[in-house]
Amino acid sequence: MSSTEHCARGFTVAELLVVLVLAGVLAAVALPKLDVVGQFGAEGWREQTVAGLRWAQATAIGHRRLVCASFDGSGLLQLRVAAANPAGDCSAALRGPDGSDRFGDTPPGAAVSVVPNGSLYFQPSGQVTLDAAGNSVAGREISVSGASSIRVAGQSGHVE
C-alpha cells in the first residue's frame, strides 16, 4: 500500500442520516400501536371483575346468604359472605376458585369508580342493594379508564 492510498471504513454522513430518518418514521408508526397493551390490561381487569361479581351473585342465591362486594384502594374486587341469615354484615371472606378473596389484577393506571358509591350487597333474593339490610335496591355502574363499564342491575343482580 502506498502512502497516498488509505482504507475507507465506516459510514458516510448521508448514510447515517438516511438510517436516522427511517428509524424516526418507523418509531412514529409503531409506537402508537404499543398503546394497545394498556387496553388489554384494562379489559382483562374488567373481565376478571365481571367474573367475581357473577360469583358473588351466584353464591348469594345458591347459599341464601348476603354477599358483600367492595373495591380496595388498589382497585381489586374483594368479596365477603355472611356467616348466617339474616345478616347485618359480611364477616367471612368469600374465596374464589383460586382460594383468594380478591378478584382480578390491579387496574392499569387508574382508580375504580362505582356509581352510586359504596359496597354492593348481593341479597339472597338476587337483588343488589345499597345496604346490608336490603332496604334500597339500586343498580350500579363500575368503570375504570380504558375499559367499557360494568353494569349491575339492581332488581335481578345481573352483571354485564
Image (tube, rainbow, N blue to C red):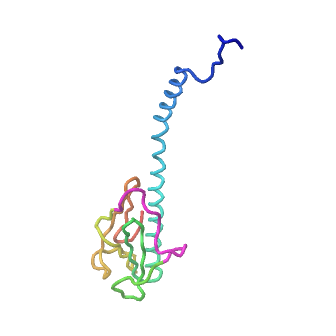
Quarter location, residue 115: bottom left
In the image, taking residue 119 as reference, residue 42 lies left or right, namely right
Question: Could you say where residue 46 lies in the image, as x and y percent from the top left?
Answer: 44, 60
Q: Residue at x 30, y 71 (%)?
A: 118
**Residue drawn where x is 66% and y is 12% of the image:** 3
Tally of marks: 0
**Stretch of the chain drawn in magenta:** 95-112
Give the percent coordinates (x, y) of residue 95: 49, 77
The C terminus sits in image quarter: bottom left
Q: Residue at x 36, y 86 (%)?
A: 87
- Of residues 145 and 154, the one nearer the viewer is 145
Q: Position of residue 57 (x, y in %)?
A: 43, 74
Chief SS of the magenta region: loop
The residue that appears at 42% across and 83% down in the rendered structure is: 65
The N terminus sits in image quarter: top right
Instruction: Say above or below: 144 vs 122.
Output: above
Image quadrant assignment for residue 54: bottom left
Compared to residue 11, the image places residue 93 above or below, namely below
Q: Magenta stretch: residue 106 in it? A: yes
Q: Is residue 139 highlighted in magenta?
A: no
Front-most of residues 84 and 19: 19
For the residue pair 17 and 70, the one nearer the viewer reads as 17
Kindly give the residue lying farthest to the front in the view shown: 3
In percent of width and height, residue 4 lies at 65, 10
Q: For the view shown, which residue lies furthest in the right direction?
A: 1
